[in-house]
Structures are given as C-alpha cells and as structure tokens.
Amino acid sequence: MKGAVAGASRCRSAQVARRIVHNGRMDRVLEPEIMDGEAEAAAYARADFSDSNQAYVADVMKSFADQLANVVDLGCGPGDIAIRLSRAATTTRITGVDGSPAMLAIARAALQSAGLRSRVSFLEGRLPGVALVDASFDLVLSKDMLHHLPDPQVLWSEVRRLGRPGAAVCVVDLSRPATSAAAHEIVERVSGSEHPLLKTDFYNSLCAAFTAEEVRDQLSAAGLSFTVSQLTERHLCVKGYLPG
C-alpha cells in the first residue's frame, strides 16, 4: 500500500491471470513498483491506521527500550510511525525513508505540524542503496513495506547494512491469505467504507504479501536469526537483533 522502493498498485489483467493456487494457497502476485501518484498517496494518508500504528510503536518501545538512540524507518509512507515514535521517545533521532515524493510531501507537512523537525527527518530513497551511512542505526523499523518488493532480499540486505552490530530489528507486514476470495473478504470486512482506490490497493497488497514460512526462508537465506510470528490473519511480525 505504501512504498519505500515500492508502493501500492492497480490490479492488472496479467496479474489476475497469475493468481494460481498451488496446494490450496494462492501464489504471490507482484504489485507495480511505487505509489507515487498524489491521489494514491492522499487516499492512503487519509485512511485510519492509527490503531495498528500505535500498537506497533508501543511494541517497539516495550521490546527495544535500550535501542532507541538512532532509528531508521524504511518505507515510512506519510510519516505516522516516525512521528508517533518521536512523541513517545523524546530523545530518539529518527530517519524515515520512502521512494514516493508524494508520500514524503505528506510526511513533511505532518512533521511541520507536529513541530518535531529537530528529531525526525525524511529522506527520498529506494532500496537497495539508500544514501545513509552503513552501520549507523541502533534500531531498524519497517511496517507494511516488505510486500511491495519484487525481491525481498533487498530489504534484508539493507537491514543488515544500516544496522549497527547488535542493532534491533522490527518488521511488520501483511500476510498473504490462502485464496483471492479470502483476500476480498478481508478487504470488505476491514476497510469496506474506505476509498475505492485504497480498497483496490489493499487487495493487491494482500495478494503480494508473503506467508510467515516464506519470510522464515528469506531470513535463513540472508543468514539472519530473527523470530517470525503471525500476529493476526493478515499481519506477521519479524523481530530480532543483528549479529555482533
């Protein structure tokens, strides 16, 4: 739905044709690369993610209280996570990264209104190779961005590059339902009253998401010993510490 190198999408006929089910589970369907349209960004920013974003920040504060000095948020979107975390942890320095200029314009306006420009900054950049110094962060965050990436190792390699030895990592993302019908049911139940564009993006994002087992395989391939847990029917969480 939002993007750090990639963003939410419109459904395309070729993608629909590829929604094949193997062993009772729908195959992953990639999204277009980035949510850079103003209409898409505005629809996403207007949606109410306050409960899930606040829960994410609260969990980060509880789980990684000693790792909050310098934080990077990959795929920051409209900046809500960074702003909420800055309000909760007043000595924390946060850098939000996103690949969508439209999203970052919204994030910077929100930051100006919040009066937190001395503690939070936003950077336009795409993974891999974001213009940030290697091994410079105590905590690497990402929420609802992994499913946008054609190659998930792009995220895990950037997590490893940006985090200091022993840095904490907390990634929350969507979890792919077993079937397209299940994805449609989730969209209508969770966001039936939202803007149609947002509902389409949500559905496409669910279809592009990974399962918990797929994420475990990604981490094994990346040499990262993180824990993957299924939070809800549509969300999973990855937590852990970098080697060192």
Image (tube, helix red, strand yellow):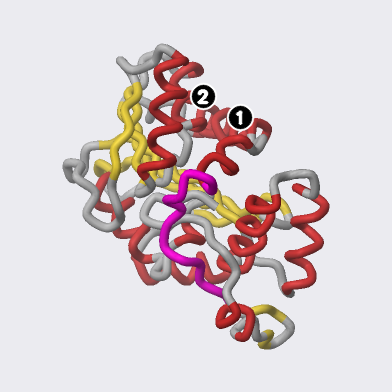
Q: Is residue 82 left or right of residue 230?
A: left
**Residue located at (70% from left, 87% from top):** 23
On the image, the x and y values in percent for residue 18 come to: 59, 84
Q: Is residue 70 magenta?
A: no
Which quadrant holds residue 28? bottom right
Find the magenta span and give its range.
Answer: 28-40
Q: Is residue 219 visible?
A: no
* SS under mark 1: helix
Query: Earlier along the polypeptide chain: callout 2 or callout 1?
Result: 1
The reply to whether callout 2 and callout 1 are in contact (CB within 8 Å) is yes
What amino acid does circle 2 point to?
A: Arg
Q: Is residue 226 left or right of residue 155?
A: right
On the image, the x and y values in percent for residue 197 come to: 64, 53
- When the figure is inspected, residue 216 is found, relative to residue 228, above or below; the finding is below
Which quadrant holds residue 140? top left
- When the figure is inspected, residue 21 is found, relative to residue 137, above or below; the finding is below
Q: Which residue is mark 2?
A: 84
Q: Which numbered tag is attached to residue 54?
A: 1
Which quadrant holds residue 111? top left
**Residue located at (55% from left, 28% from top):** 62
Q: Is residue 37 magenta?
A: yes
Q: CA distance from mark 2 to mark 1?
A: 7 Å
